[in-house]
Image (cartoon, rainbow, N blue to C red):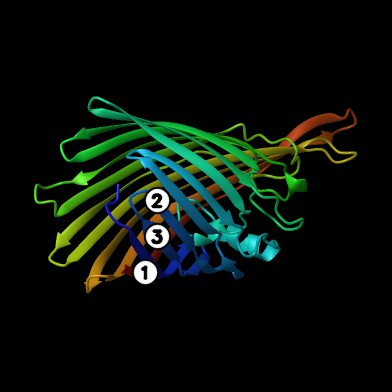
Amino acid sequence: MATRTRQTLTVSGTERRYRIGAVDVQERAAPLTWRLVSPRVAARVSGTPVSLDAAGAQLQGVTPVRARLDFILRAGDTLSVYGRRGSTPRTLNSVEASALGAAGTSVLDLSSLSMGLASQVGVRGKWSLPAGSVVFGVSAAAERDLPPPATGVVFWQGTTVRGGASVTGFVGEQTLTVSADVSSSQADSLGGRNQFPGGGALLLGASSNGAVNEAGTVWFSGDMFYVRPFGNDRNDQPTRLIPQGSFGGVSGLLLLESGALTWTPTVSLLRESSAASVTTVQQGTLPSRTSLRGSAWSVTAGLSVDLPLGASVTVSPEVGAVTGTVSSSLAQTSGRILGRRGRVVNVTNTSAFHDAVRGWWGGLSLSVRY
């Protein structure tokens, strides 16, 4: 718990350039964050103007402006009220959706992936239960996405409920936590405009953080997670492929104090896989089945340094690079009638690609504490 009230205003600028196969992706983002921490209340407001250019298609706007207010009931117990304003634009036209489709993979860091989200309000409670040398945690949350506009492509989850549990222990100076979280959402397909395929997700996670040396000048923080959706076989979008699958990764960072400077090297590995299939029947023809499978992975490494300018201002430049692959295969099976006897033969046509991912990013942030 904080001992006094502090506020921090952070303004950043980030340039990202990736190449996915033959597709060039360029993104410029300018995140803005305000934070307040006090002994009993914490608050945060953030938003990001963003510009994306991918495969000749452009997308410009502002990611959802998010606000969160935490009431600290006692150490380890928190009641949170939060919300977000829908992105600008609220829905995506065909050109904007194409830009996201050309660049969109969860293994790449892109602020633009938050575009097309609806407004949301939510409440969450978290309680800690100490038991000897470990601390058990439980959490529950309810969220509601506000109805989106009547046109355009959106990602709308409707009503979501969440529940989670965690166990925290201590090994020397390291704090170790394992957790599990389950969510379930109910939302309409909006006549095929909704990119959310229904169902819920299971999230498993583990993390470690703490000092590495006795002087406290080297800190380590590590994290690993695995997300698996379930119940996402929506049957009210019979002609649309929305791939879903697992997503996981591991990451780690060091905080290295050197005089007045703090260096932060980071590394992460991300992996996702997805699949979808749909069967269509046109009048007077035989059924046709289309299946789509995809996978991607990436390794990223970055380095930032905090440069204090006096007691209240910090400038932090950052650079990084990423490598990986994105692959996908599409198979379409349809029946054909051969011969006079009308014998039906299934014919499958396939296509696939396996593209390398390369890229870099650079950024600069300015933080003011008061």
Question: How far apart are labels 2 and 3 at the CA level?
Answer: 11 Å
**Residue located at (52% from left, 50% from top):** 82
Horizontal side of 61 relative to 356 (left or right) equals right
Going by the numbered disc 3, the residue's amino acid type is: Arg
Residue 35 is tagged as: 3
Horizontal side of 215 relative to 186 (left or right) equals left
Give the residue at the far top of this rendering: 132
Sequence-wise first label, 2 or 3: 3
Horizontal side of 160 relative to 214 (left or right) equals right
Give the residue at the far left of this rendering: 214
Q: Secondary structure at mark 3?
A: strand
Residue 41 is tagged as: 2
Mark 2 surroundings: few (<14), some (14-19) or many (≥20) residues within 10 A: some
Q: Secondary structure at mark 1?
A: strand
Question: How far apart are labels 3 and 1 at the CA level?
Answer: 23 Å
Sequence-wise first label, 1 or 2: 2
Q: Which residue is mark 1?
A: 362
Going by the numbered disc 2, the residue's amino acid type is: Val
Nearest-to-viewer mark from 2 and 3: 2
Q: Nearer the viewer, residue 14 or 301?
A: 14
Going by the numbered disc 1, the residue's amino acid type is: Gly
Residue 20 visible in the picture? no
Image coords of residue 152 (percent x, y): 72, 58
Mark 1 surroundings: few (<14), some (14-19) or many (≥20) residues within 10 A: some
Question: How far apart are labels 1 and 2 at the CA level?
Answer: 34 Å
Question: Is residue 63 depicted above or below 200 in this figure?
Answer: below
Nearest-to-viewer mark from 1 and 2: 2
Nearest-to-viewer mark from 3 and 1: 3
Q: Nearer the viewer, residue 7 or 223?
A: 7
Q: Secondary structure at mark 2?
A: strand
